[in-house]
Amino acid sequence: MSRTRVRAEDLFCARCRRTVQLKANHWPEGYLCGRCFGQALETYGTCAGCGIDRLTPGIAADGGKLCTDCAGGLGDFTCERCGQEARRYRRGVCGRCVLAEHLRELLDDGSGSTRPELLPLFDTLRQMERPWGGITWAKLPHVQRNLKALARHQVPLTHEGLSQLTPWRSVAYLRDLLVQCGVLPQADRHFLLFQRWLSEKLSTVSDPEHRKLLELFAAWHIERRLRTLAGRSPLNGSQTKQARNEIHLAITFLNYLAQGGRALADCTQTEIDSWYAGGYTARRLTHTFIRWAMRSNHMAAVTLPHRSTDNPAPITQQQRLALLRQIVNRDDVPLQDRVAAVLVLLYAQPLTRISRLSTDDVQHEDSNVCLRLGDPPSPVPAPFDRMLLDYLGKRPNTKTATNPEAQWLFPGRRAGQPMTPEALAPRLRHLGFPTRPSRTAAIRQLVLQAPAPVIARMLGYNDDHTTRIAEAAGGAWRHYAPGDHSQ
């Protein structure tokens, strides 16, 4: 009797319809791709068949979740070590047990036990909902080196001690975890990262006079400004990025003068004009260093050029509406990208503000959905209200040790941190989405439909800013008096 041969091109995942290989996992419902198989074994809840709260990888005919017994033919996923139902990583042992084993080895203080101060980190990591990421992370050579150094007292368990470790990105991730666990006290992560970058950057400056000037500039202007800003609210990536660019341009400017045989004290208007003639926009941030140098009597007074740097022209209203329709129908685009794009197109929100929104800012009462951007909250129209509510249950980066209970609307990959504007921006650019022209078009259209002060309060804008936009757009609400008009 001949056996029916199955061609690889005829194999599709029973759940997502992606093409699968002949060696793919096979359940009674059909073949499953690796992604759907992994998601199924991370799904817990109340079984629609027996009503027991347990692992529910199966799917009933009506779409309900089924446990392995009620679904039948799925296999046994009980860990032989801890007795919990979960995807088994090796030798019948689940991922959490394997991760705990790795962590005990890495956090051993040399006595065969985990260093007591690192026990909160151990507990946080081993309890993560998706241990696979933790296992992969714990296997990285630099992660193993840094964890062992902390566990065995080779470096102090302080923020200053962490600054001795490398590479800096991995150390920043570890620092956030330690702060979230309560092992280290709260500290402004962006300021610490800037200080580390500054130390490494200044060490590359070979001219001792230049390095001395830059150290003074950094200490008395850049770091002083950042400390003031950090005292008001946590620093963001844009603020420290500007600080890094100011240091970089100061170094470049000093080298430019040195190539012409001049020191900063000998700089004249001719050198200033020549410097900015080489590209005003790219060198505009040199203003900060030159103004500081003049105030500190390190150079003679000069006149700095000024050119307008207006925002790019907005897209048309027709283009804006076309983008909104496209976002609704693009099921192939990650939901988080579509939600971020809607916040720009509907509410003219900058990415710096979008990244700081929390789930508490989404208000759902009866059939009404509102978004708290200002006072009063802004209503969310259909079909975007359903999109936003669906996204709340599918937010990324919530199944690892970094943000298991995050309230951020866009959780980041680092502990306790939201997704940064620098991470959101390229995702929207990848869609061909013009962020700034779209935001400009949205705010112009909104101030044409309602008084500028009302729009400002609802969207968290400044009254003067929206009034100027309304006047430039030819709005008809110029003489509107803000305030409560219900009386």
Image (spheres, rainbow, N blue to C red):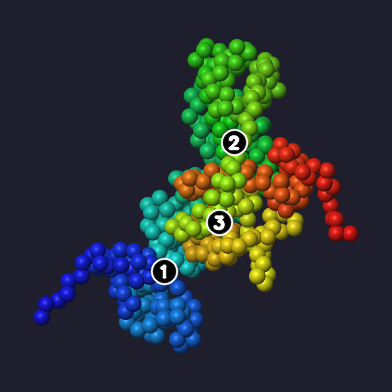
- Residue at the image point whose x is 45% and y is 73% from the top: 43
Type of amino acid at the residue the image marks with label 2: Pro
Picture quadrant where residue 363 is located: bottom right
User: What distance separates the C-alpha of mark 2 from that of mark 1?
Assistant: 43 Å
The residue labelled by disc 3 is: 339
**Which label was assigned to residue 39?**
1
Question: Marks 1 and 3: which is nearer the front?
Answer: 3
- Classify mark 3: helix, strand or loop: helix
- Check the picture and name the quadrant holding the N terminus: bottom left
On screen, residue 391 versus residue 484, left or right, reads: left
Q: Nearer the viewer, residue 238 or 161?
A: 238
Residue 204 point in image, percent of width and height:
48, 29
Picture quadrant where residue 362 is located: bottom right
Q: Are marks 3 and 2 in contact (CB under 8 Å)?
A: no
On screen, residue 401 versus residue 77, left or right, reads: right
450 over 211 or under it: above or below:
below
- Residue at the image point whose x is 17% and y is 71% from the top: 5
Mark 3: give few (<14), some (14-19) or many (20+) Cα within 10 Å: many
- Check the picture and name the quadrant holding the C terminus: bottom right
Mark 1: give few (<14), some (14-19) or many (20+) Cα within 10 Å: few
The residue labelled by disc 2 is: 312
- Classify mark 1: helix, strand or loop: helix
- Classify mark 2: helix, strand or loop: loop
- Decide which of tag 2 and tag 1 comes sooner along the chain: 1
- Decide which of tag 1 and tag 3 comes sooner along the chain: 1
Type of amino acid at the residue the image marks with label 1: Gln
Residue 413 point in image, percent of width and height:
50, 55
190 over 85 or under it: above or below:
above
Type of amino acid at the residue the image marks with label 3: Val
Question: Marks 2 and 1: which is nearer the front?
Answer: 2
Residue 429 point in image, percent of width and height:
49, 45
Q: Are marks 2 and 1 in contact (CB under 8 Å)?
A: no
